[in-house]
Image (cartoon, grey):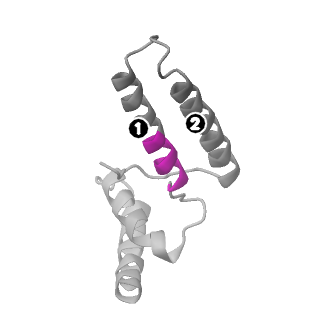
Amino acid sequence: RGKTMSYPLLSTGRYLIHIVSYLSKLKDEFMALRGRRTLEDEKLDLVVLDTKSLIKSTSRMPSDLHISPSALIDTSARYDTSYSLSVFQCISDAKVMLREMADVAREQLQ
C-alpha cells in the first residue's frame, strides 16, 4: 500500500490541485452528514478517513513528466516493473540508463 509500480505517472500540478479541491469539498459534505441518520456515523467516519487518504495520496503523487533527482529511484523501479519484458532494444537501453541514474541518486541522496 502507498506505492504504485505503474509507469508513466502523468499528472500536472494544476490538475492535481483541482482533484484535491474536489476531494476536500466531498470530505466536508460527508462530515456534514454526521448525526443526520442517513448513514451510521461509524461508516461515515470510515468514508471520511478514506477521503482524507485520497487527498494525501493525490497531494504526494509523483509525476514522470518532469523527473527530479529525488524521484529517480522510484521512477526507475516503476519503469523496470512496467516493462519487465523488453521486446525492443530501446526499452533494454532505457532500463540500463535509468538503473545507472538511480544508483547515482541512491549514492547522493541516501
Query: What element does badge 1 sit on?
Result: helix
Q: Position of residue 77 (x, y in %)?
A: 34, 63
Q: Position of residue 73 (x, y in %)?
A: 39, 71
Side (left or right) of 69 relative to 95 = right
Q: Position of residue 86 (x, y in %)?
A: 32, 56
Q: Which residues are magenta?
A: 52-60
Magenta stretch secondary structure, dominant: helix
Instruction: Give the residue number, with chain letter if any, for mark 1.
Output: 49
Front position in the image: 81 or 62: 62
- Residue 89: tell me if it is visible: no
- Is 104 included in the stretch rendered in magenta? no
Vertically, is 96 above or below 35? below
Front position in the image: 40 or 94: 40
Which residue is located at x 54 percent, y 33 percent?
Answer: 27
Q: Position of residue 14 (x, y in %)?
A: 70, 50
Instruction: Give the residue number, with chain letter if any, for mark 2.
Output: 23
Vertically, is 92 above or below 52? below
